[in-house]
Image (spheres, rainbow, N blue to C red):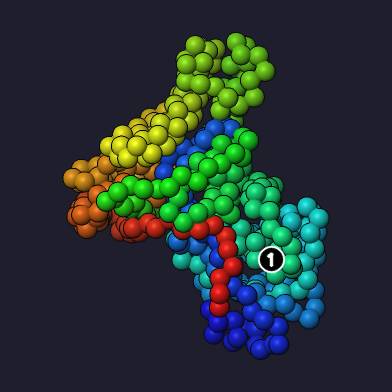
Amino acid sequence: MKQWFEEKYGSSSESVKLFYAPGRVNLIGEHTDYNGGYVFPAALTLGTWMMVRKRQDQEIHLASVDFAPVGVLNNLAEAVYDPKDDWINYPKGILHHLVRAGFSFSGYDVLYAGNLPNGAGLSSSASIQVVTGYGLLSAEGHAVDRVQLALAAQRSENEFLGVQCGIMDQFTSAMGKRSHALLLQCDTLEYKHIPFEAQGCKLIIGNTNKRRGLVDSEYNARRSQCEQAVTDLRAVIPGLQQLGELTLQQYEEAEAAIQDAVVRKRARHVVEEIDRVLRSVEALKTQDLSLFGELMNASHDSLRDYYEVTCDELNVMVEEARRVQGTFGSRMTGAGFGGCTVSLVQEEAVQPFIEHVGRTYEEKTGLKPEFYVADIGDGACQLDL
Ligand code: GLA
């Protein structure tokens, strides 16, 4: 990166700084964040790095080691999404929202590099926005409020980029902690770092390499169905705001008020999934990895049958993963419709897992998968150069 930086931007007496923000894997708690429920993700040691150096003028110049287009930002307050700007829209979106929140920025030369697979559901877009906000706020000498940063990055996704996502990805990228998973209540934003001590086990992320088609439109459709469920349930639970307020028992007593059978399935997934998150945290605390794995399996099955956000490729990868002796559990992770799976696997089964799932998945789908043995890393930070 250093070499690229100098070739692209030349030399200067100003110092160069390096920042990092990770992608995430969600262990359990899928499609619960925008329903005010719990999620249980972890930050990865894969992510986006950003090198910055102050310029003499007020322009922000952006370039990437990985993508061709370069950009110059002048007037952040007036910035708008432009499809021609490609990846530049991510830094533009977060900086626009930070300016709207009252921050100002001087001019910088900026260079990015990342090692997250793009479009694979490991939150590469959250990591680029969080690293941009964290890095430029720090370079300007502002104290960074990580929760406010995550919220600004979510607003940028919702309002600037038009993706109606919840808070999980941005929050994890900003707040992750090495060797810990993050239990987050997405309504109050109360959180706890829970040591991820799965003794003798590894998390394996499997990339189906299936492009996530339809994800935005289907994602937004699921959100509206959840809102419909809340509207119907208000007939028997006045004042209900979000599905995340309900215990499983309360939901079961009221479920008949939901008119549409599909909407009922969606709501059932959400309420049961929130319950599974809390049970999985207990399972981890007591080192009951078999139970943790069963809950992961139940989560996937519910996303397949009730929430209907899996696809053949995800289902095949999960089925093959579960056939490997030493796999405790396996599920899709992220929004769905392609992307990645996450599996909890005994250490000695890691190689057999990669061999078996790699071979059978390719035979059945014609796609070549990729595997990452995940390490849980820290959230956004500055690194020594
Ligand atoms: C995407 C969104 C998140 C969350 C997950 C599903 O990753 O960005 O906010 O809704 O899907 O759990």
Q: Quadrant of residue 140?
A: bottom right
Please tell me whether mark 1 sits on a helix, a strand or a loop: helix
Residue found 63% across the figure and 35% down from its top: 188
Furthest-front residue in this view: 286
355 to 136, vertically: above or below: above
163 to 67, vertically: above or below: above
Residue found 67% across the figure and 18% down from its top: 239
Residue 234 appears in the rendering: yes
Q: What residue is disc 1 on? A: 138
Q: Quadrant of residue 216?
A: top right
Percent x, y of residue 358 = 25, 55
285 to 148, vertically: above or below: above
Task: Locate the C terminus by quadrant.
Answer: bottom right
Percent x, y of residue 35 = 57, 32
Residue 78 appears in the rendering: no
Percent x, y of residue 310 = 40, 40
Residue found 22% across the figure and 58% down from its top: 351
Callout 1, which amino acid? Ser
Nearer to us in this view, 51 or 360: 51
The number of numbered badges drawn on the structure is 1
Q: Give the crowd class for mark 1: few <14, some 14-19, many >=20 residues within 10 Å.
A: some
Residue found 78% across the figure and 52% down from its top: 101
Q: Is residue 144 left or right of residue 383?
A: right
Q: Is residue 318 left or right of residue 136?
A: left
Percent x, y of residue 115 = 46, 66
